[in-house]
Image (cartoon, rainbow, N blue to C red):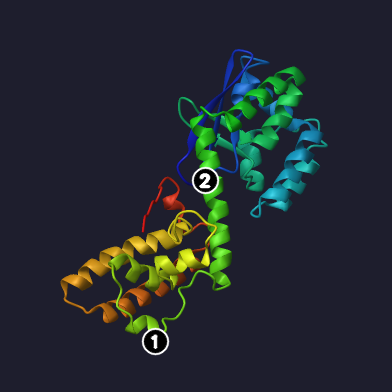
């Protein structure tokens, strides 16, 4: 797992169970904490569960479906060994033997063995069907509760990922690249600098946009994507520099349009994950 982890705690029948995510898509739940419901020696409980033939089959299938770096030969070797009475299994042995992604060992005072939620719920079923239901109940609260910090982070990041995907798709289709400037636009004198930027990025003045969209409230910047608003902010700074250099409006329009095209193409090429640093940023523009 990479990235900065976000941690939370599940509550089930008075017990605390650690949970964390680094990508806001996959949650890892503490098997160590779940096992404490059954015994004071949680590691032994986890190892006993992993020795079970059905468990081994489930873990191998999960890795095949979700882990491109899974080592099938290591899994086949474990399956052969499982037929022997002396067969033993541990989280570390499994992780090292098949390059597992679904189970991880976390060091430290609050560490232990964690597993993807798919696997953790399977383990909880083996521990106690009742206890599993309590875990799932609080898990749902965590994911949907209005007061959960982790819930807010998950929802925010997922929505931004969806937005980035849509923007990237549109950029590929050429929908977000600023249109070419016309001779009329180049020769026109714009009453304010906001409209100069609007034409350079959107190809329209604010008035033209309102005429084309009579049923919409607000303005074209309210309809802009995060990518476009970021480029617009850069254009405003650049325009201030150009004004300071004494550049005439027509020349500034060309330079600003060139900047807009280049930056929108770059952002489109970044794809879904290229702007993840913006996930906690809200951009607001008026014009």
Q: Tell me, for residue 108, which label it has, or none.
A: none
Quick check: 265 left or right of 38? Answer: left
The mark that comes first in sequence, 1 or 2, is 2
Q: Nearer the viewer, residue 167 or 185?
A: 185
Q: Quadrant of residue 167?
A: bottom right
Quarter holding the C terminus is bottom left
**Vertical position of residue 152 compared to residue 224: above or below:** above
Q: Are marks 1 and 2 in contact (CB under 8 Å)?
A: no
Identify which residue is drawn at 46% across, 25% down. 109
Q: Residue at x 39, y 59 (%)?
A: 230
Splitting the image into 4 quarters, where does residue 200 fall? bottom left
In this orientation, which residue lies closer to the viewer: 4 or 102? 4
Question: Few, some or many C-alpha atoms within 10 Å of disc 1 (few <14, some 14-19, many ≥20)?
Answer: few
- Percent position (x, y) of residue 254? 33, 80
Task: Give whichever of 212, 7 is nearer the camera.
Answer: 212
- Residue 106 appears in the rendering: no
Q: Residues within 10 Å of mark 2 (few under 14, many from 20)?
A: some
Q: Measuring 48% from the left and 36% from the top, which residue is drawn there?
A: 6
Name the residue rendered at 64%, 54% in the picture. 69
Residue highlighted by disc 2 = 157
Q: Position of residue 20 (x, y in %)?
A: 54, 34
Q: Nearer the viewer, mark 1 or mark 2?
A: 1
Q: Position of residue 93 (x, y in %)?
A: 64, 38
Determine the secondary structure under disc 2: helix
Q: Quadrant of residue 84?
A: top right
Residue 116 sits above or below residue 130 on the image: below
Residue tagged by mark 1? 183
Residues at marks 1 and 2, CA–CA distance in whole angstroms:
42 Å
Element assignment for label 1: helix
């Amino acid at each position: 797992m990479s990235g900065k982890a976000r941690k939370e705690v599940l509550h089930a029948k008075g017990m605390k169970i650690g949970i964390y995510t680094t990508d806001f898509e996959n949650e890892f739940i503490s098997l160590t904490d779940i096992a404490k419901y059954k015994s004071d020696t949680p590691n032994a409980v986890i190892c006993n569960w992993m020795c079970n033939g059905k468990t081994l089959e489930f873990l191998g299938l999960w890795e095949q479906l979700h882990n491109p770096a899974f080592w099938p030969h290591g899994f086949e070797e474990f399956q052969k060994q499982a037929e022997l009475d002396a067969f033993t299994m541990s989280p570390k042995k499994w992780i090292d033997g098949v390059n597992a992604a679904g189970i991880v060992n976390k060091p430290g005072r609050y560490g232990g063995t964690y597993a993807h939620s798919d696997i953790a719920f399977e383990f909880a079923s083996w521990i106690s069907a009742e206890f599993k239901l309590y875990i799932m109940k609080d898990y749902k609260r965590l994911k949907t509760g209005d007061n959960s910090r982790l819930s807010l982070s998950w929802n925010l990041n997922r929505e931004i990922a969806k937005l980035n995907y849509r923007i990237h798709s549109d950029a590929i289709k050429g929908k977000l690249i600023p249109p070419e400037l016309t001779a009329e636009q180049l020769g026109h004198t714009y009453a304010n600098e906001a409209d100069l930027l609007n034409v350079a990025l959107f190809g329209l003045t604010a008035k033209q946009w309102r005429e084309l969209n009579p049923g919409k409230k607000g303005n074209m910047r309210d309809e802009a994507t995060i990518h476009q608003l970021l480029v617009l902010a850069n254009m405003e700074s650049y325009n201030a520099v150009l004004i300071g250099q004494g550049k005439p409006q027509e020349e500034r329009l060309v330079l600003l349009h060139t900047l807009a095209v280049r930056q929108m193409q770059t952002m489109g090429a970044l794809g879904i994950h290229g702007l993840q640093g913006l996930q906690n940023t809200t951009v607001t523009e008026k014009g």
